[in-house]
Amino acid sequence: MSGYLRRLATTGAAYTAASILSKVIAVALLPLYTRHLTKEDYGAAEILFAAVVSASIVVRFGLIEAVLRFYYSDDEEPRRVVSSSFAALFWLSTLAALIALPFAKPISELLLKEPAAGLARISIAGLWVLTMSEFLLTLFRLEERARAYFVTTLLNVIGTIALTVVLVVGAGEGARGLLLGSYGAGAATVLVLIAMQWRSLSLRFDRALLRRLFRFGLPTMPAEASLYLLNFVDRIIIVRSAGTATAGLAAAGLYSLAVKFAQGINVLVRGFQLAWPPLAYSIRDDDEARRVYAAVVTLFVAACAFVVTGMWLLSRWIVRALAAPEFFGSYKAIGLIATAVTLYALYLVLVVILGRTGRTEFNFPATLAALVANVVLNLILVPPLGIVGAALALVASYLVVLALMYVFTQRLFPVPYEWGRLARIVLAAAALVGVGELALPTAGAAGLLGRVLLVAAYPFVLLAGGFFTVAERAWLARLRDPGQLLAELAALRAQPAAVAGSVPEAYEAELRDEDAAP
C-alpha cells in the first residue's frame, strides 16, 4: 500500500507541476499579449477557448472517465479498452467537427454577437485537437509515466508560447493568433503522441466494450458539463448584455483577464485537490474521519482566505504590473473570482466525501441548480453591474452548489464542521478587505505598503481572535525545527489508505477540464 501511495504522490506531483507551470507561464505572458491585443480580441479568443472545452465535455460522452476506471478492471483487457476508446473518440470528435464546420458563421454570431466564421473554424478544429490530446495525455497517467506526462505538457506549453508570440506579436494576428497558437501547437503534440502510442491505438472499436464504457461514463457527463458551464455562460451573457458586439467583447476580455489573475490561488488549491482524496480515504474510523474532515476544511479555508485577501487588496497593483493600461478595469472582479475559486475547491471536498459513501448521483442535481442560479443571476446582475455582476453571480452559484452538497453529505455522512472558527476566518478577511478598500489609497506607494501590511496582519488577526487551538499553536511553534516537521509529515505520508472509496469520476473530470482551459 505504501508503494501505491508513493506512485500516487509521484504522478500527482507531475500533474500538479505541469498544471501550475502552464498557468504561471500564461500569467507571465499577459504583459506581452495585452499590449498587442485589444480587449475585444482577448474577449473573443477566451470565449471560444471556453466554448471548445464545453463542447469537448459533451463530445467525449464520458469516455475518458470510463477509461480511467475500466483500464484497471480485472474483467477487461487494458489494450482493448485503450484502442476502442481511442477509436470512438477519434470518430466522435471528427464527426462533431465536420457537422459544425458548415455552421461556423452562425456559431460565431451566437457566441460573439458578430460574424467571425474564421475564428469559429479554428475553434472547431480545436475541438478535435483538445479532445484527442486529453485522451492521449490520459494514457500517460494510466501507465503512471509521470516524467513523460510532465515533459510532454511542458513541450506543448513552450510550443504554444513560441507560435502564439510569432502570430500575435510578430504578425499581429490578434484573436486569430491566440487560437492558432494554442491549437496549432496542440495538433503537433497530438500527432507526436499518436506516433508514440500507435501500437496501442486503433480506428476500429469493440461494440460490446464500447457499450459498457458508455454505460459507465455517460452519467458523469451532465454534472461535469453543468459545472463547467458556470465558467462559460457568464461570458456569453456579458457579450449579449452590452449595447454592441464590440462593447460586449471588450467587457468579456476584462472579465477573462480577471479570471486569469484569480487563478493565482490555484497554486494553493491545486495541490490540495490532488492530496485530499488519498487523505480522505486513508482514515478507517468514521468518527475520526469526521473530526479530521472538519479540521481540514477549517485550515484550508483559513489558508485560502489569506490568499484571497491579498488578491482582493492588491488587485489594482497586480493588473498595473501585468497588463496593458486599457485592461485596468479587470481588477474590479479579481477578488470576487478568487473567492469563487475557493468555493469551487470546497465543493470538490464535498464531492470526495460523497465518494466515501458511494452516492455520487447527488452531484448532478447540485451542479444543475448552480447552473440555473448562475444564468438567472447573470441576467439580473450583469446589465447594471457589468463584470462585477458576473463575478457576484459566480460566487452565489458556488454557494448554491455548496449548500446543496452540504445537505446531501450531511444526510449520508454528517461532519461536525467548526462553524465558529470558520466565522472567524470570514470576519477577519472581510474586515481587512473592508479597511483596505475604504481607508487606504488606491494608487501609489503608500497605498501599496498599507495594503501589504494589512495582508500580513491576517494571521495575527486570527491569532488575536482566538482562532488557533492549543494543538495548532504547538504545531506552529515546531516550524522552528524543520527537520522534525519533515519527519512527522513523512510518517503521515506512509499511512495506508483504509477505506474502500474512490475518487468520483466527476472529480477527475473537473480537475482535467480545469487544466484544459487555456
Image: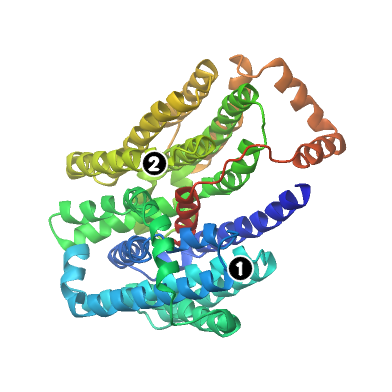
> Residue 175: x and y, percent?
33, 72
Badge 2 local density, few (<14 within 10 Å), some, or many (20+)? few
Q: Residue at x 63, y 23 (%)?
A: 460
**First reached walking from the N terminus: tag 2 or tag 1:** 1
Q: Is residue 447 visible?
A: no
Up/down of 447 relative to 470, above or below:
below
Looking at the image, residue 425 sits to the left or right of residue 439; the answer is right
The residue where tag 1 is placed is 140
Q: Visible in this render: residue 67?
A: yes
Choose between 22 and 363: the one closer to the eye: 363
| Viewer-side residue, 52 vs 31 | 52
The residue under the point 58% across, 24% down is: 290
Splitting the image into 4 quarters, where does residue 99 fall?
A: bottom left
Residue on which disc 2 sits = 361
Query: Is residue 204 placed above or below 337 in the rendered structure?
Result: below
Q: Position of residue 306 (x, y in %)?
A: 55, 34
Q: Nearer the viewer, mark 2 or mark 1?
A: 2
Q: How many marks?
A: 2
Question: Which three-letter amino acid code belongs to the residue tagged 1?
Answer: Phe
